[in-house]
Amino acid sequence: MRSGLSNSIMTKILVGLLGLLVLTMIGGQIYTYVTDRHDTQEAVLCTINEDISFDGIIVRDETMLSYSGSDVVSYVYSDGSKVSEGDVVANLYSSQEAALAQQRADEITEEIEQLERAQNPGTTDYVQPETISSKADDYYKQMISYANSGDYESLAETKTDITLILNIYNIISGISESYDARIAELSSELSELEAVGSAVDSITASMTGYFVSYCDGYEDELNTENVYDLTQSDIEDIIAGEQEAKESVPDSAVGKMFEDYSCLIVGVIEEDSRVAEDVTLQLTLDSTSTVYDVDVVSVSDAQEDGKIIVVLSCDYLDEAIASSRIQSMQLIFGEYSGLKVPRTALRFQGEEKGVYVILGEDITFKKVDVIYEGDPDEGDDFILSANTSDDNYLRLYDQILLEVVTEDDVQSSSSESADSDEVSSDT
């Protein structure tokens, strides 16, 4: 009886001691976690775009085209097209219906010509299906490229080319015997459209040069000589008054001409040492992905501190850059992608620049490969390190220590790790 009671008491004592030991161990771990917590930041990927965005004013020496009648104007050329003096740039119709009928008639005429070429024996007798297939594939890739770059004029031309060769393929492969029935149908529709009415007059180019179908009210105010006299206030007033200027354009204005395909671009930007006279830069517009080469021809102080007035010269003309006087633009200086590191976390071992990272209980020095340095004056107090798989360098998701790390910390960490390894080995 006494023996059983003694065993019961002993069991309770052992259980109590074991519970106390467990609580002590857990408490110790919690204490260690709380007191030994480190201030860290995870190394994550960051992309920095160094573009300078601004609203630019496009300036040329322009001559307005006028027409005082009330007829409907239908343009023949897209904006920025080169024309010769006397070329018809627009046709005039008595009604909107007649203008639309003529547009459809032009489309039908082109389709008939395409179908007649596609079934011409001189074409079909000497073309192999494999050749057609290869050309179609090339044209398809070109169309994707033009669509991605925003070159819609070339896209339309390539679409016409691919339609022609596919029509030829249908004939030589036997999918279609001929297009005579389709041509007859289109010819009948063409006759009906021509009966609606034709152009009653036309507008011709006043000079050899480039044509644009819109006027914005600044044709007489802005030119390549007075652009250098514009102040920051002038530029801001022009941008702010864009809509008001358009409303002041006379009703007789139907477009404009300019002799030179080049233009000047003026805008106000933040002061930047990379923007200097005689430097060639790259520029994009919000309306297209095309990259334009521009030369910096003038840099002057703006009225506002920290800003400058820049005049750029662009020797390229397309529909996008001809479509509007004022456009949102970006000067491109590069894009950097790497691991973001706070400047305050940078440390040195000898001449090696790097950071301390914590891996488990170990504190390790890892080098950084600096590819970009932010400007602390602009709030960018960090650097970007190249994203690499080299263990000697900072790697993605490493825990960067932000606190000051002494040699003793590193040695202590290494010593604790070694002791832990010895205990595991003994065990």
Image (tube, rainbow, N blue to C red):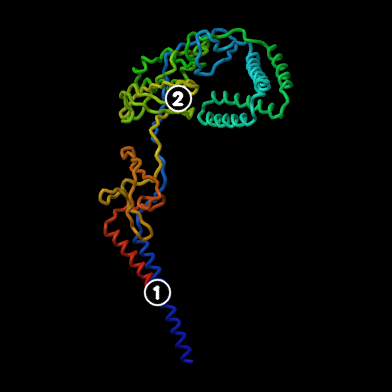
List the single residue furthest toward the front.
126
Give percent across and percent down for residue 21: 40, 74
Residue at left offset 37%, top offset 20% = 234
Residue 11 disc label? none
Residue at left offset 67%, top offset 24% = 125
- Quick one: 159 or 150, which is closer to the camera? 159
**Residue placed under numbered mark 2 in the picture:** 327
332 above or below 398? above
The local secondary structure at tag 2 comes to strand
Q: Quadrant of the C terminus?
A: bottom left
Q: Which amino acid does label 1 sit on?
A: Leu
List the single residue furthest toward the bottom.
1
* Badge nearest the viewer, 1 or 2: 2
Q: How many labels does the image show?
A: 2
The local secondary structure at tag 1 comes to helix
Q: Which amino acid does label 2 sit on?
A: Gln
Give percent across and percent down for residue 228: 34, 18
- Quick one: 57 or 292, which is closer to the camera? 292
Give percent across and percent down for residue 399: 38, 53
Is 132 left, or right, of 151 in this rendering? right
- Quick one: 6 or 419, which is closer to the camera? 419
Residue 21 disc label? 1
- Quick one: 2 or 104, which is closer to the camera? 104
Residue at left offset 42%, top offset 81% = 13
Crowd band around label 2 with a 10 angstrom C-alpha radius: few (<14), some (14–19), many (20+) = some
The quadrant where residue 310 appears? top left
Give percent across and percent down for residue 43: 39, 49
